[in-house]
Amino acid sequence: MNVQVNATFQVNDYLNSVIEEKVSKLANYYDRITEAEIYLKIGEKRHRQAEDQIVELRVAVPGHTFFAEDHSDKFEKAVAGAADKVKRQLLKHKEQVTDHH
C-alpha cells in the first residue's frame, strides 16, 4: 500500500511513524487497499483553545474511495480518529462485498 502524507509544514519522524502505523493497520481489516493519502492541516484558533489539528484520510480500494476527517488538539489523536472512521467504512464495505445474498 502506498501512503502519501501531505502537509503545509514539515512532518517530523515521530508523526510519520504514527501515521504509518495507524494506516498500515487498516490492511488488517481490508487487504485490497491500494493507496492512502493523509492531509494534515492546522485550523484556526477558536474560543481561546489550542489550535485545531485537522486530519483528512482518503483510502482507495479497487472501485471505491473512503474518506474520513477528524479534529483534535494533537495530530496523533486526529490520525487515530480518522483511521478508526475509515476502519468502520472498510468493515462495512467488506461485509457488503462478501455478503452473497
Image (tube, rainbow, N blue to C red):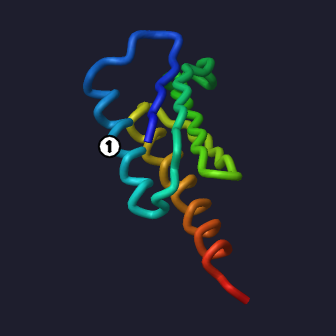
What quarter of the picture does the N terminus occupy? Answer: top left
* Residue that appears at 60% across and 50% down: 61
Q: Is residue 2 above or below residue 80?
A: above
**Whole-percent x and y of residue 93?**
64, 66
Seen in the image, is 11 located left or right of residue 38?
left
- As helix, strand or loop, the secondary structure at mark 1 comes to helix
* Residue that appears at 45% across and 33% down: 3
**Whole-percent x and y of residue 33?**
51, 50
What quarter of the picture does the C terminus occupy? Answer: bottom right
User: Hey, which residue is sitting farthest bottom in the picture?
Assistant: 101
Seen in the image, is 6 located left or right of residue 68?
left
* Residue that appears at 44% across and 54% down: 26
* Residue that appears at 38% across and 36% down: 19
Foreground residue, 5 or 9? 5
Provide the residue designation for mark 1: 21
Q: Is residue 96 above or below residue 57?
A: below
Q: Quadrant of residue 98?
A: bottom right
Foreground residue, 48 or 57? 57
Neighbour tally class for label 1: few under 14, some 14-19, many 20 plus, Cα within 10 Å = few
Which three-letter amino acid code belongs to the residue tagged 1? Glu
Q: Is residue 37 above or below residue 70?
A: above
**Whole-percent x and y of residue 79?**
45, 40
**Whole-percent x and y of residue 55?**
54, 33
